Image (cartoon, helix red, strand yellow):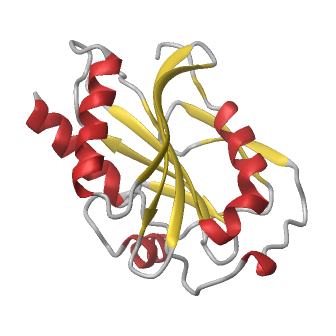
Amino acid sequence: MNKILILLSLVLIVSCDSSPKEKMTNNDVVISDLALNEITIPNTQISISIPVEFTELALEDIELKWGGNKTAPKWATGNENMGTTISYSINLFDASEVPLKDVMLGMKQGFDRVVPGISWEKNEVINLNGKDWIIFEFTSNTIDTEVHNIMVTTDLGNVMPILNFNSIVDQFEGYESLLRTSLDSVTLSQGQ
């Protein structure tokens, strides 16, 4: 079981990279509109409110940002320079026979082993709009910057959807409120 949870953590880790196309500083962040638009992530039952200034990333941008990795997200949206994004990926992992808290603890152990410079802010099970989710909040290092991640995942039987709200640290303060409001808006359609 521990090996499976560590493997699951490794898949999640790849979705943590938030290196933008070009390095920016907090002075470059201009949030023109604090409004959110509710959307359904394509080909899912997940609804979420995203910042109106965010645009869906093209496949080429996802490959650029996440290095064409096999575990790159299936969908992502972000600001103009991709320094702050919300991404969705899926793990084909059935955690229905394991308490979510145990899954969380195993994943945390995996993160601790392999994420460079990880500094934890939160790792717990929370309730989002009637569904229990694991939440991980941490900062970590990438090749050229520090990243703030807020990642949630839950068990849906034979799959675990992953949503990652991340930002380079220099942009996080400017986007934090929008990212947290977006996270709070996550809902699953009936049957999940």
* Visible residue check, residue 157: no
Counting the numbered discs, the total is 0
Q: Nearer the viewer, residue 4 or 87?
A: 4
Q: Residue at x 26, y 25 (%)?
A: 158
Q: Is residue 37 left or right of residue 77?
A: right
Q: Residue at x 21, y 12 (%)?
A: 97
Q: Is residue 11 left or right of residue 21?
A: left
* Visible residue check, residue 89: yes
Q: Nearer the viewer, residue 160 or 124?
A: 124
Q: Residue at x 59, y 60 (%)?
A: 85
* Residue 121 drawn at (x, y percent): 52, 42
Q: Is residue 123 left or right of residue 9?
A: right
Q: Residue at x 17, y 45 (%)?
A: 7
Is 103 above or below relative to 50?
above
Residue at the outermost bottom position: 22
Q: Is residue 8 left or right of residue 25?
A: left
**Where, by quadrant of the figure, is residue 31 drawn?**
bottom right
Is 122 above or below relative to 167?
above
* Residue 40 drawn at (x, y percent): 62, 39
Q: Nearer the viewer, residue 149 or 129?
A: 149
- Quarter of the image that includes the N terminus: top left
Is 183 above or below relative to 102?
below
* Residue 127 drawn at (x, y percent): 56, 18
* Residue 87 drawn at (x, y percent): 51, 53
**Where, by quadrant of the figure, is residue 157 drawn?**
top left
